[in-house]
Image (cartoon, rainbow, N blue to C red):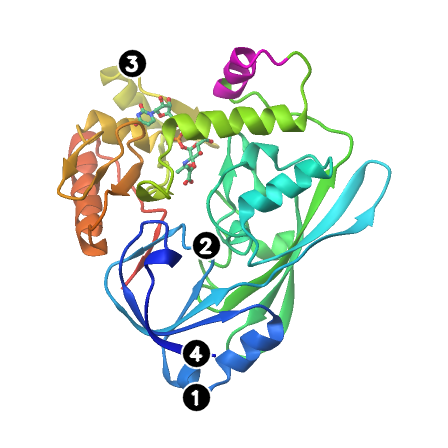
Amino acid sequence: MIEQDISLKPYNTFGLNSVARYFSKANSIESVREILQSSIAQQSRLLVLGGGSNLLLTQDYDGLVLKNDIPGKKIIEQTEKSVVVEVGGGENWHEFVLWTLENGLGGLENLSLIPGNVGASPMQNIGAYGVEIKDRFVELNAYHIPSGEVHTFSKDDCEFGYRESVFKRKLKGEYMICSVKYALSLDHEFNISYGAIEQELEAMNVSELSIQAVSNAVINIRRSKLPDPKEIGNSGSFFKNPVVPTSLANKLKDRHPNMPSYPAGENRTKLAAGWLIEQAGWKGYRKGDYGVHAKQALVLVNYGDATGQQIYNLSQEILDSVKEKFDVELEREVNIIR
Ligand code: EPU
């Protein structure tokens, strides 16, 4: 069924009140096909929506919004040490992570509490606290919108990078991700080298490491820094951490010895966008109903009735001021929808 003039407010974590001319939900590949082959779909531009946690709607959407609601979580292969699971693109990411923990499956615990749905996880190779989904990815099935065929993508086919994949680059807008397979462990190796996790585990008095304990530590850290979209509209990190020539990073370090930086390949250094934005004076900035989160400057927020265009304009002001102060070009991580 295709509905008309539907507010997208419940479907985007920024809580923006854009109206979709047409709106539909699909809970199977067959229903995706049926909707996309309808005459409305043939005549409209298309926006495929997952959990709505990585987009900024700058105005009403004069086209068809198709929400991916494809469900399913199952173990499809098991050996002594590892398990392959298959999960529907419409499943909520964090609920999926909790399900892996309940089943004793390790590998995704560092990615607890990331907003959004499973279908978007490979799209932008979601990551946090030293882990990215590409570390556990096996393959995915995706609906090819122009042909109506379902194609399988291996890890190489996905061309994963930092918050990047082929689906954000050369295949942008061509596929809807229906299901993803992840390889998880029964014999856990923990990844707690990311500073804050060890400290949090200590503060929690954890004596024996477990995937559950690491997940709880990550949840505590995220809750302490990142706003809950149910309370304050936001889309997580609005910008990517910029990778710059090491010569520029060294010049900045001379001026700002405390600036965080991380090696990122030959002659490349990754900087912390949150630090740059904070130094440019934006942390905690608020005008009307929009602003920059007070505890994490990478996160732009909607306190109620902000518009997407206001938030977009703020992001441009931030880009300009970081460029002027540090000669660093930030890049938006969030998809801008016009
Ligand atoms: N920092 C500041 N001020 C700020 C924010 C950060 O000085 O307002 C400094 C911190 O003190 C730290 C450094 O910047 O030295 C890095 O900060 P943090 O560890 O909080 O991580 P991040 O680089 O800001 C990235 C991801 C997050 C992810 C965390 C943890 C990106 C764009 N963001 O943030 O991902 O949760 O690391 O792994 O890579 C997301 O993508 O939506 C997201 C929240």
* Residue where numbered disc 3 is placed: 257
Look at the image and give the residue range highlighted in magenta: 196-206
Inspect the magenta stretch and tell me whether residue 203 lies in it.
yes
- Mark 3 and mark 4: span between their CA atoms? 56 Å
Could one spot residue 149 in this view of the protein?
no
Would you place residue 296 above or below residue 330 in this image? above
Q: Where ligand 1 lies, by image quadrant?
A: top left
* Residue where numbered disc 1 is placed: 39
Kindly give the residue lying farthest to the left in the view shown: 287
Q: Residue at x 21, y 30 (%)?
A: 284
Dot 4, how many residues are within 10 Å of its Cα: few (below 14), some (14-19), or many (20+)? some
Residue 95 at x, y = what percent? 58, 45
- Mark 1 and mark 3: span between their CA atoms? 60 Å
Tell which of 223 and 33 is nearer to you.
223
Q: Main secondary structure of the magenta part?
A: helix
* Residue where numbered disc 2 is placed: 51
The amino acid on which the numbered mark 1 sits, given as a three-letter code, is Ser
The amino acid on which the numbered mark 3 sits, given as a three-letter code, is Pro
Q: Closer to us: mark 3 or mark 2?
A: 2
| Quarter of the image where the C terminus is located | bottom left
Tell which of 4 and 168 is nearer to you.
4
SS at circle 2: loop
N-terminal label among 2 and 4: 4
Residue 186 at x, y = what percent? 77, 34
